[in-house]
Image (cartoon, rainbow, N blue to C red):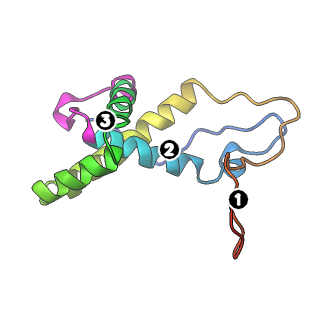
Amino acid sequence: MIATTTARPSLTASAGTPVHEACHGLREHTVRIWTQALYCSPLRPSDRPTPHTVCQAIVEQLTACSRVPGGCTALIAQDVGDYPTGFPERIAWCQRTADHAYTVLLTLHPPQFPEDWTAPCRPLVPVPRSGQALH
């Protein structure tokens, strides 16, 4: 079984801004996507996967899910409908395992930032303000 931890790597951008503050929500969003991909993968707790194996399975499953309308979410919805009693335990394991793999990945390969990096992460697409439409 993969040991889980709530501790996060202490990462700091070169300008001194902690990464977890600068990119608030990025970790949670990434782990949510990884959790869904892991849920759809053939990995099981009995496989005792390493973080490296988990990352490989996630990449493979995200590639496979990209070819399915609705992606991993659609596959999970189908599975929940077919096997509702197994969902809570499986999704909890997937979330813990994805979170642990993400922590290990950040510890081994911390992000690199330019020297003048001080701005928080910004969305890649425009986000409308309340009452404003995108054109």
Check disc 1 and report the residue beneath it. Answer: 135
Magenta residues, start to end: 40-55
Toward which corner of the image does residue 12 lie, by quadrant?
top right
Residue 116 in sight in this render? yes
Using the image, tell me which numbered label, if any, was put on residue 30.
Answer: 2
Q: Quadrant of residue 17?
A: top right
Tell me if label 1 and label 3 are in contact, CB under 8 Å.
no
Any part of residue 5 in sight: no
Q: Which residue is the extreme one toward the front? A: 135
The answer to whether marks 1 and 2 mark residues whose Cβ atoms lie closer than 8 Å is no
Relative placement, left or right, of 85 versus 105 is: left
Circles 3 and 2: CB distance less than 8 Å?
Answer: no
Q: Position of residue 41 (x, y in %)?
A: 26, 35
Looking at numbered disc 2 in the image, what kind of residue is underneath it?
Thr
Residue at left offset 20%, top offset 35%: 44
Q: Is residue 50 magenta?
A: yes
SS category of the residue bearing label 1:
loop
Instruction: Give the Cα separation between the discs numbered 1 and 2.
Output: 28 Å
Q: Which mark is residue 2?
A: 3
Q: For residue 31, what is the image quadrant?
A: top left
Q: Amino acid at mark 1?
A: His
